[in-house]
């Protein structure tokens, strides 16, 4: 029998790691921020509003015994992102994990969509992820180590039936391919970049008016016949953040209840 010295559960241990999570005031980003802390990380929680859920996120992390700070910044502002990374490192130490979950969604038929609606969403969902990765990677490349996880969407792979959101779908396809491209640029310098593509997930984003009547339809279209809970995004994020995924880079992890199989 061949012996192994591998301690498998320790692969998921994030003790002593510093994490930055964008969009940490709500939904998927908030739950992942708390999940990383539950696995041992100290977390800088970034969102654009201080009057949203950021204080709750910090309180939930405090309750885990880990440390958290709230950082107010817009992901379209590179200087603010640099400040956020610097603040995280000053407070907790070298940045090792980043989860970029900040994003928006809205809908309009393609032939009617104004340039401003298109551009605003692209600026946040695609350029915002790029600028976040840039700021985070600049720190991680200096340390020669780090894991970046971008929250894309199954909408970057499929077109959601009944939803006119060409800009959103394109932005998410962009995030998936951008993640693979950066993964390859940094593959020999210790920085891994992967994406998670959630299926329909129960968050405030899905309470926007055009979604309300469609929730049941989304559930019936999903092979698992239900939406995901935010809790179900934590395992995939911890996996990609941790040493458990040390040989994974450039991966898009679909967490969609089987949606993309049909
Ligand atoms: P959410 O509950 O609305 O959370 C998104 C957070 O990002 C909000 O706190 C939002 O603030 C913040 N944000 C938006 N623009 C920002 C900016 N410019 N700078 C900093 N923060 C900003 O949405 P969610 O459902 O958790 O979505 C999180 C991510 O998952 C998004 O990228 C989304 O596209 C993706 N996703 C969601 C689903 C789903 O079914 N929910 C499925 C697939 C992918 P405001 O409240 O001020 O906007």
Image (tube, rainbow, N blue to C red):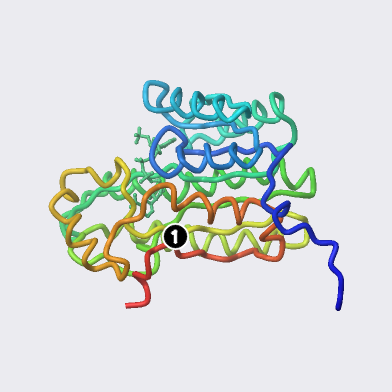
Q: Secondary structure at mark 1?
A: strand
In the rendered image, the residue lying farthest to the front is 1
Percent position (x, y) of residue 236?
Answer: 53, 56
Percent position (x, y) of residue 195?
Answer: 53, 58
The residue located at (35%, 62%) in the rendering is 155
User: Quarter holding the C terminus?
Assistant: bottom left
Tally the marks.
Answer: 1
In the rendered image, the residue lying farthest to the left is 213
Please state which of residues 111 and 171 is positioned toward the viewer in this rendering.
171
Q: Is mark 1 within 8 Å of ligand 1?
A: yes
| Up-down relation of residue 49 to residue 143 (above or below) | above
Left/right placement of residue 173 relative to residue 208 reads: right
| Up-down relation of residue 88 to residue 130 (above or below) | above
Percent position (x, y) of residue 207?
Answer: 23, 43
Q: Callout 1 environment at 10 Å: few (<14), some (14 to 19), or many (20+)? A: many
The residue located at (65%, 26%) in the rendering is 87
Query: Mark 1 highlights which residue?
Result: 197
Q: Quadrant of ligand 1?
A: top left
Residue 123 in which image quadrant: top left
């Amino acid at each position: 029998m061949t012996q192994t010295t591998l301690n498998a559960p320790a692969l998921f241990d994030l003790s002593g790691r510093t994490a930055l999570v964008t969009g940490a005031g709500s939904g998927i980003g908030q739950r992942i921020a708390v999940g990383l802390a539950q696995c041992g990380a100290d977390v800088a929680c970034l969102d654009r509003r201080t009057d949203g859920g950021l204080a709750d996120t910090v309180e939930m992390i405090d309750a885990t015994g880990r440390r958290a700070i709230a950082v107010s910044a817009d992901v379209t502002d590179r200087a603010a992102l640099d400040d956020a990374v610097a603040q995280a490192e000053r407070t907790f130490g070298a940045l090792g994990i980043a989860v970029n979950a900040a994003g928006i969604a809205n809908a309009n038929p393609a032939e009617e969509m104004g340039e401003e609606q298109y551009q605003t969403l692209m600026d946040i969902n695609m350029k915002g992820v790029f600028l976040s990765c840039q700021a985070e990677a600049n720190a991680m490349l200096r340390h020669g180590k780090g894991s970046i996880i971008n929250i894309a969407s199954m909408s970057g792979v499929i077109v959601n039936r009944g939803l006119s959101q060409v800009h959103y779908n394109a932005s998410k396809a962009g995030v998936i391919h951008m993640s693979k491209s950066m993964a390859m640029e940094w593959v020999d310098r210790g920085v891994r970049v992967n994406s998670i593509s959630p299926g329909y997930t129960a968050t405030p984003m899905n309470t926007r008016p055009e979604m309300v009547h469609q929730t049941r339809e989304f559930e019936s279209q999903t092979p698992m016949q239900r939406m995901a809970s935010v809790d179900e995004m934590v395992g995939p994020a911890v996996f990609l953040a941790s040493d458990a995924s040390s040989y994974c880079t450039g991966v898009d992890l679909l967490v969609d209840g089987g949606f993309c199989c049909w």
